[in-house]
Amino acid sequence: MDFKSLLQKIVSSVDGAIGAGVIGEDGIAIDQFSSRSDFDITAAGAEYSTIISNAKKASQSFGLGKTNEVLISTEKATMIMMMVGDNYFVTLALSLDGNLGRGRLELKKSIPDLEKML
Amino acid sequence: MADAFKAEIEDLKKKLSQNPDSLAFVPLAEVYRKSGMYKEAVETCKAGLEKHPAYTSARVVLGRIYVEQELYDDAAEELKKVEAVDIDNIMVHSMLGNIYVKKQMFAKAVEQFQRVLSLNPEDTETQEKLQEALSAKQTVNTAPNKEEKPQQAAPAEKPAVKEEKPVMSDLQKSLKVAELYSKKEEFDKAIEIYRELLEKDAENIIIQQRLREVYDFQQKKINKQKEQKEKRKTAENDKITAEDILDVMKEAVENDLVDDEKSEPAAKKEEPKKEEAKKEEPKKEEAKKEEVKKEEPKKEEVKKEEKKKEEEKKEEPKKEEVKKEEPKKEEPKKEEVKKETVEKLPEIADNKKIEIGNVLQSLSTVDGIVGSLFLLRDGQLVASVLPTSINKSEIGGIVASIVNKTEQSVKNMKQGKLNQVVIASEHGQLLFTELGKGVLFIIGDENINVGKMGLVLKQVKEKMKQLI
């Protein structure tokens, strides 16, 4: 299975999922799948990576060790980011009424496969 | 090769045409590069950089495209622009090192590889490159006048001459101004400049670091001022005024009278002693009066000092007004910004701070919550319930910096207002949520009950909203 197929599988199995992507910590997306044309994870890659790097710094400042997951809720969407290895992360964007629990589960399940692909 | 990327290119082109201001030009340029379409890659990158000149990642991509085309001078020019604003960018130093090796400018290559290793000492590949560059440098040194002369044709040397007299960029100027403000302890102005710079380039580690430092300095200054105020207060409370002495004397006389009434029989036996005491009393009273007289001038001096301070305080705004009227090149804009910042951040009364502290205490009932704090956007700590292992004086700046940067990223992603962020790590979780003009920040350990925390958090937010 390639990146896009895996991301597509995640998006299609979670209610309210808008899009998913695999992004490097340098902000450049490896691949993405979006169910909406107005939601572009590739273009927002740099912002996602900034959030992840801030989260890592915050965890370090409080002595909490390695960051595994970041969850952001905004006025328009909820975003889940999970680390894949040290330098990549997978992200899933959900609408406000999206199934957050299922989203987290599907992302967690995808990590071993993504690690093999990277 | 281009065919393999055709679909991806079309997809990215479509996205970019739908939203020409987006950052999709970077992945598009990368795909063009991978497919060997260098001309298109350069054009896409340059067009994007015209709209986003501070987007350093795009410059790195452009530098990489030039390197693959063996246009080393052009590549170095782009990468140096990144280096000027992001001195700790490993990738840039590594790429510059490789470019200088290609140009046989080994001294400069050594310098760049050394920088990479200072940032990542375990990089074995760069260690090898450094060794090679060092030995090449020595070989060149044995042949005089060869060192630092690039192999390319003479015109390529021109930019190198220019580089020797670097012109300060706008970013460098702004950084300098912010640094000066910071040195002058005008932290609000420095913070405002750094925030403006981060709006243009949210990824810039140098600016992020400096902003954090300014927040730290500001917090330390606030703490110092608080300590000094408290010291002054305790000193004033410790001063014995004439009224205090009179009160003590009155109490003593009253107590004596009560004692006399209670112990009348015994008093008869002690009458001689009492008479002696009575004789002593006028003497004592005289001594006390003298003490009071001595204290009174001191009290007057304190009052005078207080009056002076009050007058000075009244005059300060006038002085500031005069300062504002003075014509200065850059200051008027910054002064306006400062005003706005001050208006945005409300003063929270001490009694409310205590109430907020009590509300935070209720969060401690949730299993796994080790601490919580409420702070204003400038990093000013309003109330906190924290373990002793966490340094209160530093935490405000750190948290404010994290919150501001995350908010900025969400804003750039056009996802509306940031509501809540949860960071789950190996040994615990961090949660922050926006509350009016401030931020509620919660620290939990690995055993935190996330469900219960959510419920308590809702109640806490409601209570806090009423208080703020």
Image: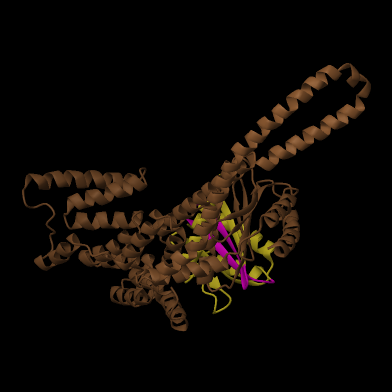
Magenta stretch secondary structure, dominant: strand
Whether A21 is among the magenta residues is: no
Question: Chain B takes which shade in the image?
Answer: brown
On screen, residue B32 versus residue A95, left or right, reads: left
Q: In this picture, is B125 found above or below B204?
A: above
Quadrant placement of the N terminus of chain B: bottom left
Between residue B23 and residue A88, name the one nearer to us: B23
Q: Nearer the viewer, residue B305 or A83?
A: B305
Asked whether residue B244 appears in the rendered view, the answer is: yes
Q: Where residue A19 sits: x, y (%)? A: 57, 71
Q: Residue at x 69, y 40 (%)?
A: B244
Residue B382: x and y in percent read 62, 55
Residue A1 lies, with reference to residue B278, above or below; the image says below
Q: How many marks?
A: 0
Q: Which chain is yellow?
A: A
Q: Nearer the viewer, residue B184 or B367?
A: B184
The C terminus of chain B: image quadrant: bottom right
Q: Residue furthest left?
A: B144
The image quarter containing residue B149 is bottom left
User: What residue appears at the point 40 percent right and 72 percent down from the top-left corner?
Assistant: B325
Q: Is residue B390 visible?
A: no
Residue B65 on image: x %, y %: 30, 67
- Colour theme: by chain
In the rendered image, which quarter is residue B274 located in?
top right
Residue at (33, 45) in percent of width and height: B118
Residue B79 percent across, percent down from the top left: 29, 62
B179 left or right of B349 in image: left
Q: Nearer the viewer, residue B455 or B358?
A: B358
Range drawn in magenta = A74-97
